[in-house]
Image (cartoon, grey):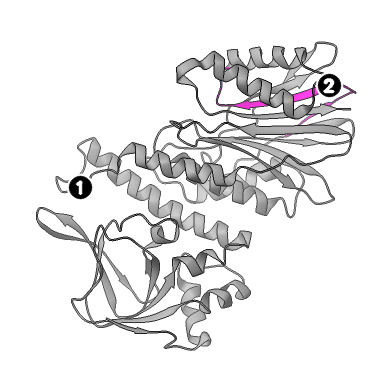
Amino acid sequence: MTDSSRPWSEDQVIPLLEKVDLFRGLPSEDLRRIAGIVEGLTVAPGEELFAEGEPGDAYFIVFSGSIEILKSAGGGLEKLAVRRAGEGFGEMALLNDAPRSATARAAEATRMMRVPREAFRELLGGDSLALRMMRVLSKALRALDVRFAAAEKGGGPASAPTPAPTHDLDAISRVMQRGMLPTRAPRSEGWDLAAGSTTEEAGRGNTVWDWLELPGGGVALAVLEVKSEGFPPAHLLGMARAALRVAARTTARPDELLAAANAALADVHVDGVDQFVDCGIVVPGDGSLAWAGAGKLNGGMLGRAGTFEPFASHGPALGMLEGFKYGTQRIGLGTGDTGLVLAGVSTGLFRGAADLVAQVHGKPAGEVVATVHKAIRKAQGNGASEISVVYLRKH
């Protein structure tokens, strides 16, 4: 195996990067930045690039030649795929330092480009690059999850790989979840806003809240939740969150924000994995709020006089039905009226939380959210689940 820091010119590297799924469609500026960190590598016929179980630290792109992807099976190696010029592999190494899930071996003399994980992470400041990375990773990882599920049900070959322990996947999901949570709530003139998500040690990282800056200076608050079992849920949450942030550059309409996130998740959906994202978006405005919901989240407007108007669901969870057109619910609010959205709780617990909010109406918004979190966790007891709360009060 021979290393070479830059065996090709930038003009040679960029056209190849444009063909790779991970980078296809990126602006030329991003491609040039990536081209600036790639390293060269030459592998002899029959030589292993890396072995199954070794720690991964880089993503690879074939420049010329071919690489076989092999999996341990029955005391030997079973060929899963062949990567040729313009194709990449090893995407998981850009996400974490988990062991390689397969062996990569040169089928012939092969020249390659190596993208180091640490250098690549430094480039993830742009939403377009981050979103593209998550889309491709989702395709690869969720397809792998389908194979694992088939093996567990006896539908795969005897040599099918053993799934990673659930607790390990949950730990990864919790780390991703905590990294997505905002450190502060936004400000909106005429409103008191607060939000939060609990992070349980035994949780799966299946819910987060977020806020978006909108064209014209407004803000939107979003609640996201993955209810079904399957692949670590924070991965889907991260992709939906990234899609919302990209869409918020050009639209302030909550229905259009949902449509953009739905398109991103539907684009990478894998048949056989029924795992989707429930999402609610609320936009506070002058004397009213706008709401759009995908899937089933508990929320509503609590009038100062004791009235209640539920937030409607405007369509299926994100990723379930490609091209779906969501709606928007607009509700007029007066001084003292509040909006409340909860993820991770039953309808009964939501009603109890709504009654509690009415009782602590005069407290600061952040204290209201903390009180709701504490009360729900107490009600759930030892089986406490992760929850997200968004609270808005008109003043």
For the record, the magenta segment spans 328-346
227 vs 21: above or below: above
Tell me which label, 1 or 2, sits earlier in the chain. 1
Nearest the viewer among 261 and 38 is 38
Q: Is residue 292 visible?
A: no
Asked if the magenta segment contains residue 332, the reply would be yes
Q: Secondary structure at mark 1?
A: loop
Quadrant of residue 26 within the rendered picture: bottom right
132 with respect to 68 (left or right): right
204 vs 355: above or below: below
Where residue 144 appears, x then y in whole percent? 33, 49
At 22% across and 80% down in the image, what residue appears? 108
Quadrant of residue 2 within the rendered picture: bottom left
Q: Amino acid at mark 1?
A: Ala
Where residue 394 appears, x then y in whole percent? 85, 27
Residue topped by disc 2: 337
